[in-house]
Image (cartoon, coloured by chain):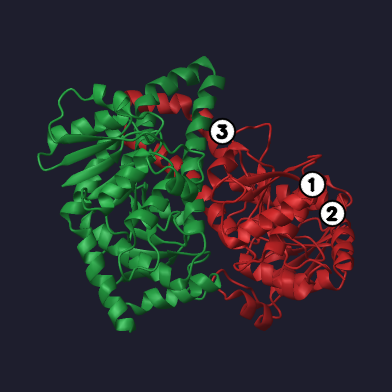
Chain colours: A green, B red
Amino acid sequence: MKIAVDAMGGDNAPASVVEGILKTRDEFQDMEFILFGKLNQVKPLVKDSTRISFVQADEEIVMNDEPVKAIRRKKNSSLVLAAKAVKEGEADALFSCGNTGALLAAGLLLIGRIKGVQRPGLLSTLPVVSASQGGFNLLDSGANADNKPEYLYQFALMGKYYAQSVRGIENPRIGLLNNGTEPHKGSKLTQTAYQLISADKSLNFVGNVESRDLTNGVCDVAVADGFTGNAVLKAIEGTASSVMHLIKDSVKDANLFAKLGALMFKPSLMGIKERINPARYGGAVLLGVKAPVVKAHGSSDAQTVYYTMKQIKTIIDGDLLAKFEETFHQEKHEDQ
Amino acid sequence: MKIAVDAMGGDNAPASVVEGILKTRDEFQDMEFILFGKLNQVKPLVKDSTRISFVQADEEIVMNDEPVKAIRRKKNSSLVLAAKAVKEGEADALFSCGNTGALLAAGLLLIGRIKGVQRPGLLSTLPVVSASQGGFNLLDSGANADNKPEYLYQFALMGKYYAQSVRGIENPRIGLLNNGTEPHKGSKLTQTAYQLISADKSLNFVGNVESRDLTNGVCDVAVADGFTGNAVLKAIEGTASSVMHLIKDSVKDANLFAKLGALMFKPSLMGIKERINPARYGGAVLLGVKAPVVKAHGSSDAQTVYYTMKQIKTIIDGDLLAKFEETFHQEKHEDQ
C-alpha cells in the first residue's frame, strides 16, 4: 500500500512528519510513502529513501486559510497534490497534520464521495475511563454543520464497520448523542434519526446517549450531527486539559509538604495525562470518501504520526472501503 | 420576597432542601418560603417555622416522568402547586431540585413567557480555570432542542443582563458557541445568529468561541442553541468527573510511595474537585419567564440549596425581570 503524505502540514512539519514516516517504513515492509512538500526541507531529513518517493510542492496551505478557497487556489500545495495523487490511484490514502477544513475539502472535492454515501462524516476516537474499552468513536465530529436524519443513519453504519474492522469490536454498541436517554427525546433531527437507526436490526443500537456518559464508555460508537459532535469533542478535550492545568497550578500554590506529595504521585498523574491525550488515539478519519483521508493533530510528534500510520494500515488491511461500497451501493439500489 | 419551594424534588429531598431553606431563612430577614410537599415528611424537619409556610401536595413528579404529561396530569404535585403559587402572585420565584424537564414545562406552561421573549432559555454557570473569573454562563443549556437565530440573539441579551445584574460584570463578554472562531464558520443557524448578535452594538460581542476554550474563560456568557448547549454542559461535567475518577483509580493502582504522595497532595486535589463541582456555581435559571425558575442539581445538599437561594435573592434584588420586560416589550414594539 502507498500513502500520500502532506509533509508540510502541522506545527512540527516537516521534521516530525518525516521522522514518523521513517519509523513506520522501517517496521512495515508492505508500506510505501510519497512525501509532498518543499523538497529542500524534506529531502535532507531522509537519509535512506527505501520505499519513499518525493514530489515537490511549491505552496503550503496554512492554518488560517479558508478551506475551500485554499483547495481551489493553491493548486501546487502539498495537500492538493497529495489528494490528487490519491484521486488518480497513485496512492491508497491521504494523510495530513495540517488545516482540518482544507483536508476535509480535499477529501470531498478532490477524492470524492463513495456512491450512495450522502455525506462523509469525520470519525474521532476519544478516551474512556475504563482502560479495557480503549476508547469510543464519535462521528460526525465536524465534517457537516447542517444535517439530515439520513446522514446520521449512515454515520451509524459507517461507525459500526469502522469499529468492527479497525478496532476489532465484533458487535459495537451504537449510541445516538441526544439531550436525554428516553426514545422521545431530542430535536426533530435526532427524533427522526432515532427511528431510522432503531429500525435497522443489523445495528446493535443502545438508544440515546448523553455526552456526560461518553467518557464512561456508554457506547463504542456515538453518532452525532457534525455541529454537536464537534462541540462535544472540543468540550471533552478542553475540559480534560483544563483539569490537568488546575492540578499543575495547584502544585505551584501548594505548601512544601503537598508539593513533595505531588512529586511522589507525579508518575501516576503523567500516566493519566497520557491516557487522556487525544493524540494517543490516532487520527480523525473522514469516512465515506473513496480513500482513507486521515488527519492527525496539528501538534503531532513523530510517535503520533507513527500511530496514525498504523491506523491507516489497519483501515486498508481491513478493506473498510470495500465494505462501505458494498453497503451504500446496495442501499442506493434499494432506494430506486 | 417569597420563594415557592418544591420540597420533594431531588435525591435528598425533603431533608436537604428543608435544611438549606432553614439556613437561608436564618441569614436573610427579608426572605420568606412556602414549602410544597408531603407535610407529614416536611413539617417534622422544621422546628421553628418563622417566615415559613406549608402547602400539602399529595403527588410527586419523579425523575422518569414525561415532563409535559406530568405537569398536566399531576395537578396536586409539589412542583405544579408551587408553580401555580408563583403564577398567582403568591410567590416571587420557583425552586426545585427535581425533574428538570418538568420544571421547565412548569415555567413555560404555568408561569409563562415574558411578552416579547420568543423562547425562554436555560442559563447554567460553569467553572473556568482562572479563579478570578469565577465561571462562565452558558445559555441555552437545554430548554430548546430546535432553534431559530432570533432565539440565540435574545439569549445573548438575557445573558448579558444576567451577568451584569447577578454576577456584577459591568460589560460581559458575549461569545457565540460555534465550530470555529472565524465569522463565516458554522451552521446556517449560527451564521445568521452571528449577524444578528454582531449587529447589536450594545453587546460586547467577542465573536465565535469554541467549546474547548470555554473552561479557559474565553467569554463570560456563551450563547448556544439548547441542543448543543446541553451537550457541551454535560460533556464538561462528565469529563471533569471522569478525570477525577481516573485520579482516584490511579491511587488504588499505585505503589506505596506514590500512594503516600497522593495522600500528602490530597488537600490540593480536594480543592480542585470542589472548584469544578457544578453545584458550587448555583442553580440553572430559566430566563425569559415571568418569575425566576431555578433548578439545583438533583444531588444537591443543604449547602447547595443555600447557595442557590442566595442566587435567587440576587436575581430578585437586581430586578432582572424588570430589565427583561423593558428590553423585550420594547423590541416587540420596534418589530411592529
Picture coordinates of residue A115 (x, y %)?
30, 69
- Residue occupying the point 54% across, 17% down: A255
Callout 2, which amino acid? Leu
Q: Mark 1 highlights which residue?
A: B166
Q: Is residue A238 left or right of residue A123?
A: right
Q: Quadrant of residue B190?
A: bottom right
Say which of B286 and B73 sits in front: B286
Q: N-terminal of the two: label 3 or label 1?
A: 1
Up-down: is A123 above or below B75? above
Q: Which element type, helix, strand or loop, lies under badge 1?
A: loop
Callout 3, which amino acid? Gly
Q: N-terminal of the two: label 1 or label 2?
A: 1
Q: Is residue B190 visible?
A: yes
Q: Chain of mark 3?
A: B
* Quarter of the picture holding the C terminus of chain A: bottom left
Residue B271, numbered label: 3
